[in-house]
Amino acid sequence: MQPGAEAMLDVVDVGKRSLATYRGVAPDVQLDELLHLAERLRGARCMHLNATSYGGGVSELLRSLVPLYNDLGITTDWKLIHGDEAFFQVTKRIHNGLQGAPGELSESEKAIYLANAQLNASRLVSDSEDYDFIFVHDPQPAVLAAISSLHDARWIWRCHIDTSHPTPSFWEFLSPYLRAYDSAVFTHQDFIPPELPIRDVHVYAPAIDPLSPKNFPLPDDLARHVLEWIGIRTHRPLVTQVGRFDRWKDPLGVVRAYQRVRPHVPDLQLALVGSLALDDPEGWEVYEEVRAATAGDSLIHVLTNLVGVGNIEVNALQTFSNVVIQKSLREGFGLVVSEAVWKGTPVIGGRVGGIPLQLPEDTGGILVSSVEECAEALLHLLRQPEEARLLGARGREHVRQNFLMPRLLRDHLRLLNHLASRRPLPARDIVPAFVQAGLPGV
């Protein structure tokens, strides 16, 4: 470790990506607009800050977004806050409370959260490089804008969760610290919490990366080999749910729906796939509950990143499944819905949060509100494979137009240009957009 490294935030290595590789995949109009939007931002410095580099949707988004920022000439870093188990226990409670779970923080829990924030604020200043824009993702690092001395940056709070009805005690604790932000971004208009102290609010959805290992096309033979390797029998029908082991994802509800269908489709397999991440200690508890509820059933496969199930395996599961389920009780967006639909696989999704955005009527799948509705929809799609195929095909085009990475990058750059128009950026060296992005001049 280099001298002073213990006082710095960790930087995530994301490699390099080229916007040009999305030609022929994402709509051309989005790619062309990106080049124009990047012109005023060339040479700007940006940082994205969150709690973990793996195990959730935010980390997947940043792994693709950050290198594309850099490809467009916007120098961008992805950094991680530090925290111990006690801190992440508290932030999980805040996360749940902002989504409406009952309870309140004790004074000792508030002290743990704020002490960690102070530590990260000092690390943020010690390795700062005069950032023009700082995106802070979700509640874990949310107070940093208020206690940091980096006043020249334009601070953006990107809240990925459904905060439409936060438990008052949690919101009253966090909201005063949000006044320091220049802007906030939510996935859905309905997610904006009451009495938000940030006046400049933007709404746009996340997106998937069609060129990532989780989403690029897998040859049929390779997908079969990958699935057989992890215990899936590819000659039997398969239904899958992918997501953190989180009570809001309702994995036990998925098990109950599957058990209702199983007598009608005796050889049906269920795969429950989830990541266990550093910033989600509650995930271990839910994982153990799922294991206990499925013990002894050889056709239920409970799979995690700890047994080697990663992006390629998830790709194969979503590609090869007859149906994918995302039966969430609360959901900010649910990237796995668009991931599955992009592969032409129909999805049964909870009628909550950002899932209906991805599954409009007769497109991509079926929305449900209960275990009973989920079981009914699952049996219907298994018995009507042509209808399932058509739903998947219509859903894929909906995702192409609305939920691929270039569209998300476009919305980010629109926001940065908006902030730069309110407070101009300092002069910096400019690299032409079409040169930086490897595209022909437009």
Image (cartoon, rainbow, N blue to C red):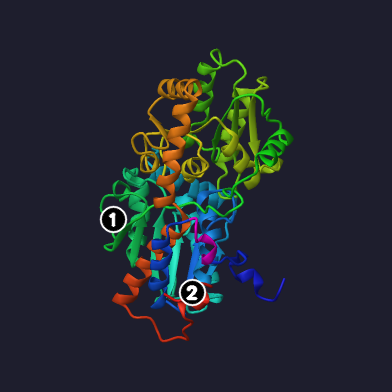
Residue type at mark 1 is Leu
The circle on residue 179 is none
Observer able to see residue 333: no
Foreground residue among 272 and 87: 272
How crowded pointer 1 is (Cα within 10 Å; few <14, some 14-19, many 20+) is rated as: some
Locate the N terminus by quadrant: bottom right
Residue for badge 1: 196
Name the N-terminal-most of marks 2 and 1: 1
- Location of the C terminus by quadrant is bottom left
In the rendered image, residue 153, in percent from the top left (x then y), is placed at 41, 75
Mark 2 → mark 1, Cα distance in angstroms? 43 Å
Of discs 2 and 1, which sits in the foreground?
2
In depth, the one of 340 and 155 nearer the eye is: 340
| Residue 183 coordinates in the image, percent (x, y) | 33, 64
Q: Would residue 113 be counted in the magenta stretch?
A: no
Task: Please rate how many residues cluster around mark 2, counting C-alpha atoms within 10 Å: few if below 14, some from 14 to 19, many from 20.
Answer: few
Q: Are marks 2 and 1 in contact (CB under 8 Å)?
A: no
Q: Which residue: 29% across, 75% down?
A: 422
Q: How many marks?
A: 2
x and y percent of residue 141 in the render? 47, 59
Q: Is residue 236 visible?
A: yes
Judge left or right: residue 295 versus residue 364. Answer: right
- Residue under circle 2? 440
Q: Secondary structure at mark 2?
A: loop
In the foreground, 313 or 286 = 313
**What are the residue bounds of the magenta stretch?**
19-25
Q: Is residue 150 above or below residue 49?
A: below
Helix, strand or loop at disc 1?
loop
